[in-house]
């Protein structure tokens, strides 16, 4: 029997003023990306009372390109990033930006991630799951040294997490049903996310039926429900920093420990410094965590997700 409690976390934008994007592509707003598909056949269930247009905000950060968040998302979609012609390998990844279930860090935890994947032959889909601001949202102070505060904060965001997970599971169903349309293999679909997006990732892994379960997952500075993993849980790539002041690093260790205890495959990378919300954003002064994508790429190759598996 899988044991479950309702203890979760959700982070806000998850990015600090000391970060700067290097080698980023393009300078356009996320709404200008061409290929966008709706994941639900009609209105998304459970948010009938959500109204108002989406709001896109330019973050006042010293990046080399405009960096956006999006909120008031009522119609969940997938934004498609295809590899260059002839380079697709049949693998797909759903990318879940963070944002505390208040908004979506759509640039540095979404679009830049998708482009990185597409450059490696993976068809990427940025999931714009439903979010809206919550009155009184606040990350408790010194949460890293007070895990009890983390648990209470997590519980307050459970409703937003459930909605995001529902969209994540529906995204998996949509891609498996339409795999031929996108030139992907239905047994080579993974999911990854950052902060709240990583929690969404783990919710999809933990709560979905076997037919909807991802083939692999990558929760980056996230957390999971306090429950036993599914019997045939997918391999995971996990990364976090010791000095994360928003999602304690112990949450990533707990994911790894849970998978290890269940004799499931997982790889864990912990870095001394880097804070929360680094995404695809190198630090001003280079840190080892800036190379986490190199470790991720090696892991993808080890599992043959970056080798030809064309359907």
Image (spheres, rainbow, N blue to C red):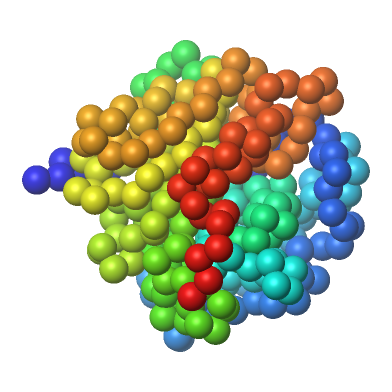
Can residue 288 be seen here? yes
Residue depicted at 65% across the width and 76% down the height: 36
Q: Relative to 304, does residue 309 appear above or below in the rendering?
A: below
Residue depicted at 39% across the width and 59% down the height: 214
Quadrant that contains the N terminus:
top left
Name the residue furthest left: 1
Residue 20 appears in which quarter of the rendering? top right
Viewed as shown, does residue 27 lie left or right of 214? right
Q: Position of residue 89 (x, y in %)?
A: 58, 65
Q: How many marks?
A: 0
Name the residue furthest front: 308
| Nearest to the observer: residue 41 or residue 263 | 263
Residue depicted at 33% across the width and 66% down the height: 212
| Nearest to the observer: residue 71 or residue 108 | 108
Residue 228 appears in which quarter of the rendering? top left
Q: Position of residue 111 (x, y in %)?
A: 70, 57
Q: Relative to 145, does residue 289 appear above or below in the rendering?
A: below
Can residue 277 be seen here? no
Q: Position of residue 92 (x, y in %)?
A: 54, 64
Q: Relative to 216, does residue 177 appear above or below in the rendering?
A: below
Residue depicted at 57% across the width and 54% down the height: 306
Q: Position of residue 293 (x, y in %)?
A: 64, 39
């Amino acid at each position: 029997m899988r044991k479950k409690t309702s203890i979760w976390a959700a982070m806000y934008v998850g990015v600090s003023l000391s970060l700067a994007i290097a080698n980023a592509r393009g300078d356009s707003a996320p709404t200008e990306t061409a290929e966008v598909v709706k994941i639900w056949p009609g209105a998304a269930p459970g948010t009938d009372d959500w109204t108002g247009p989406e709001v896109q905000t330019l973050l006042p950060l010293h990046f080399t390109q405009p960096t956006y968040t999006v909120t008031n998302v009522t119609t969940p979609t997938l934004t498609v990033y295809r590899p260059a012609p002839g380079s697709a390998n049949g693998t797909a990844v759903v990318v879940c930006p963070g944002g505390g279930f208040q908004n979506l860090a759509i640039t540095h935890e979404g679009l830049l991630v998708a482009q990185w994947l597409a450059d490696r032959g993976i068809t990427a889909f940025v999931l714009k799951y439903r979010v809206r601001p919550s009155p009184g949202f606040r990350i408790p102070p010194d949460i890293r040294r007070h895990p009890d505060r983390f648990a209470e904060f997590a519980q307050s965001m459970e409703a937003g997490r459930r909605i995001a997970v529902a969209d994540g599971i529906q995204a998996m169903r949509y891609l498996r049903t339409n795999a031929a349309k996108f030139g992907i293999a239905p047994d080579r679909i993974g999911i990854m996310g950052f902060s709240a997006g990583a929690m969404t990732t783990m919710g999809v892994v933990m709560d979905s039926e076997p037919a909807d379960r991802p083939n692999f997952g990558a929760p980056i500075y996230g957390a999971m429900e306090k429950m036993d993993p599914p019997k045939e849980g997918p391999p995971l790539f996990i990364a976090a920093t010791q000095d994360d002041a928003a999602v304690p690093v112990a949450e990533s260790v707990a994911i790894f420990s849970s998978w290890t205890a269940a004799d499931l495959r997982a790889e864990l990378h912990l870095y001394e410094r880097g804070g929360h919300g680094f995404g695809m954003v190198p630090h001003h002064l280079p840190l080892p965590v800036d190379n986490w994508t190199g470790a991720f790429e090696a892991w993808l190759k080890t599992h043959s997700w970056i080798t030809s598996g064309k359907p």
